[in-house]
Amino acid sequence: MFRSPTDFHPSRALFLATLLLGAFAPAVAAPASDTPLMPELGCADCLELKIVQPGSFVMGSDTQGRQMGPDEQPATTVTIADPFMIGVTQVTRAQFSVCAEETGHSPRLGCWTYTQYGWAQEQTANWRNPGFPQSETDPVVCVSREDATAFLAWASARDEIQYRLPTEAEWHLASGAHLPTPFWGTQYDICDFGNVPDLTSKNKTAKAGEPCSDGALYTAPVASYKPNPNGLFDMIGNAWEWTADCWTGSYDGLPTDGSPLLDTVCTEHALRGHSWTDAPGPVRPQTRYSLSPVARQSIVGFRIAADIPEAE
């Protein structure tokens, strides 16, 4: 959580993190409620992390399926040997705002967003003005990978814990992308678990949508929907999330220990998770997206991760 350096202790992160089972439990519908699903943390700029237990799983396939992109080949078995922590939600506007105010970090103007003329690079758009209304608890978007790493550096110094972007393998495990079937059930149920291209956005910002309604045309406040079996919110939809990995167009060379795929000349980085609007096609946690680290889009945000601090 964001705390002053004097009252934050690495062991405190272990107390705040919720230990997760190594195997995913079946998705259970959350009880109906008019109250937000997000736990009450006591402050608008708090960061909550959960512990994900290690595991062995396969990323990708040796044969390209009907729903797969060519960048999901070849099949690679990954074994993450140690537990790690990942953000319960995507980083919000309120959280990013504290960093911007305290550090003076001011990303340059310009963001690819939805305008009255359709999708375009809008030179006046930025994270404060992504081209549509947002609340302070919506995920921050129009942030480049460089903006995300600037936030992580600031938050790490403030909280005395080394925050980072999750590796693509960590994100894959935490999201449930390795499960044999989608954790949300059928395509008619996905809107209960995420803000995705749906009937609300069909023929408005997208030409196709999932056959359900999530109630949001653009981004939605984080934790507006049911969590995945790992207790993490918005692991499908709302905003694509930057990862630590370089995107090379395939899984060739993907480290088998869960560390990030790095390249000496990395022009694009991998993102996961889909957003409030995407190109026609099924919404899958396995889908990969790639962008230049300086690119800003109104469908892209990020989530924090961290190694578990050693107890004092």
Image: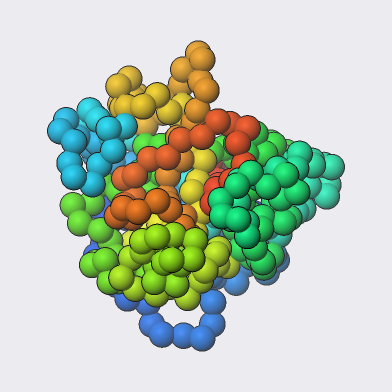
Q: Eyeballing the image, is 219 above or below 305?
A: below
Q: Is residue 306 above or below residue 216?
A: above
Q: Is residue 248 above or below residue 61?
A: above
Q: Position of residue 75 (x, y in %)?
A: 21, 31
Of the 4 image quadrants, the one containing the C terminus is top right
In the current view of this chain or complex, which residue is farthest to the top? Answer: 264
Number of disc labels? 0
**Rendered image quadrant of residue 255:** top left
- For image coordinates 18% across by 45% down, the residue present is 66
Residue occupying the point 67% across, 66% down: 133
User: Can residue 164 be seen at all in this image of the molecule?
Assistant: yes
Q: Position of residue 213 (x, y in %)?
A: 39, 75
Q: Nearer the viewer, residue 3 or 206?
A: 206
Instruction: Please name the residue shown 40% across and 51% down the image.
Output: 279
| Residue 224 is at least partly visible in this image | no
On screen, residue 40 versus residue 54, left or right, reads right
**x, y percent for residue 135:** 67, 68
Compared with 54, 229 (above or below) is below
Q: Residue furthest left?
A: 63
From the viewer's side, name the closer residue of 271 and 171.
271
Q: Which image quarter is the N terminus in? A: bottom right
Q: Is residue 96 left or right of residue 16?
A: right
Q: Position of residue 264 (x, y in %)?
A: 50, 13
Name the residue: 35% across, 54% down.
Answer: 280
Residue in front for this viewpoint, 198 or 208:
208
Residue placed farthest to the front in the image?
A: 117
